[in-house]
Amino acid sequence: MKILLLIVLASLCLFFGYKFYHKYKKRKCFFEALVFLCQKFDVEINFSRERVQNILLNLDEKTKQSLCGLVENFLCCLESQESLDKQKLLKNISFLSEDESNRLFLFFKSLGRSDVENQLKEIKNYEAKFNDFFAQASNEYKKYGKLSLKLSFVATLMVIVIFL
Amino acid sequence: MLEKILPANIFSIFDKYVNFKCVNEIRLRVDKPIVVSIGSQKFFLSSHGTTGNLKEAILPTKTMLEDIIFRASECSIYSVNEQIKRGYLVTEGGIRLGLGGDLIEEKGQIKTLTNFNSINIRIPHEIKNCSLSCFDYLLQDNQILNTLVISPPGAGKTTFLRDFISQLSQRNYAFNVLVLDERGEIDLGNKGCIGNFADKISFASKKTGFENGIRSLSPNLIVTDELGREEDVEAVLTACNAGVSIMASVHSDSIESFMKKVLFEKIIKEKVFKRFVVLSLRNGPGTLEGIYNENLSRLGSKIMR
């Protein structure tokens, strides 16, 4: 019974530690991919006037994965002919703050809505903002992400020591 | 294609109550009734089809117009800005959206069109054999005569040109035809209705298209829509000097009003065009009013539709 309890408690500590670590890592990768997406839009629109849907469809799998379904959600909204809905766009993305999700929504809402010059200006502005978010997420990851993983190991060890 | 452009509620009305094959134009203006042109008649669009009652008419909003343009540009307005600057937008199926709004100019150059307040959706139709009654008049000694199709807007100029190219192909006249499709309307947006012997240059100005086309594709015949500027006339004259036959169209109500246009004085004087085909809306789009020779004498008169 004691050993069973030990295993459960140790697993819980490791689980929560990893969960927090994963959350911060996901946020960091998400904003990194978002900055990359902005750069991709910038290049593709500037040089080939490539359409939004084509740019997103030709995005590499790694970036798509890092964006946690955002690309698929956006393409789905475009296909559905309805006006862009924040809930639908950010479906399954729960790790963003209110400000971050608002910016993201406005960014996607602005895509394809203006001429080249204005579109590029907008993308540049959003890229700068997403870069700030990325810097913030990187700091959080370094501070809290790794820390929570370490703490979970320490807590697990403490549980083992207390029980044994 | 219209289902991709129009809002779902508007499209469903067309789908349920209106025969798209008869619709020539749909005009949407902010807070004004939607007008549908069927043949030469005009109706308002209501929730149960077309109507003459203004009170039942649907009034489009500004957002609706913006969404239509957004969707017609395949969700990327920047990719069609060159067209928008010229006041139109051509979609995949050759459907042309004429746009009204605020023109932004900078240093004498049009930058873009914004604040859209009206859209004229022109639906192209492929009317097979509509040029057949003129066909024999436009060929002589196995050569296509330089021909100008004259008609008011919406009377079937482009449809006539499209069918003529198709007739050439069907009858195995292996002329190298160059379709200079400035607005992407002649080929109905790549539907392949211009036959087997036609090359196409799209969205280029007539000057550039004629120069590049003659140089690179050595055509026997150049087909182009709507001559309207001095440089268009110059391009035609250059092509004629290069020994290429021309088939073009021009906006005008009648042969008489065409003759009064200063722009075409030189062309008429030098007898560049050997045939003039005049179309009107008298009995619906595509009514053939007459075929004229280089001396502007009538050759034939038949009703096409």
Image (spheres, rainbow, N blue to C red):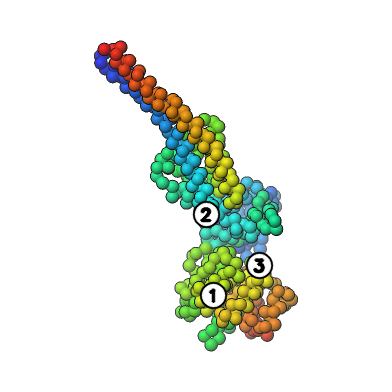
Residue at figure coordinates x 47%, y 47% from the top left: A56
Q: Nearer the viewer, mark 3 or mark 1?
A: 1
Percent coordinates x, y for residue B14 in the rendering: 57, 55
Residue named by callout 3:
B153
Quarter occupied by the C terminus of chain A: top left
In this view of the protein, which residue sits in the foreground, B24 or A146? A146
Disc 3: host chain: B
In this view of the protein, which residue sits in the foreground, B84 or A140? A140
On residue B106, which mark appears?
A: none
Residue named by callout 1:
B214
In this view of the protein, which residue sits in the foreground, B33 or A153? A153
For the residues labelled 3 and 1, say whether their Cβ atoms are less than 8 Å apart.
no
Whole-number angstrom distance, CA of label 3 to CA of label 1: 29 Å
- Count of all numbered marks drawn on residues in the image: 3
Whole-number angstrom distance, CA of label 3 to CA of label 2: 36 Å
| Residue B30 can be seen, yes or no | yes
Residue at figure coordinates x 67%, y 70% from the top left: B229
Disc 1: host chain: B
Q: Nearer the viewer, mark 1 or mark 2?
A: 2
Whole-number angstrom distance, CA of label 1 to CA of label 2: 28 Å
Residue at figure coordinates x 53%, y 87% from the top left: B141
Are callouts 3 and 2 both on one chain? Answer: no
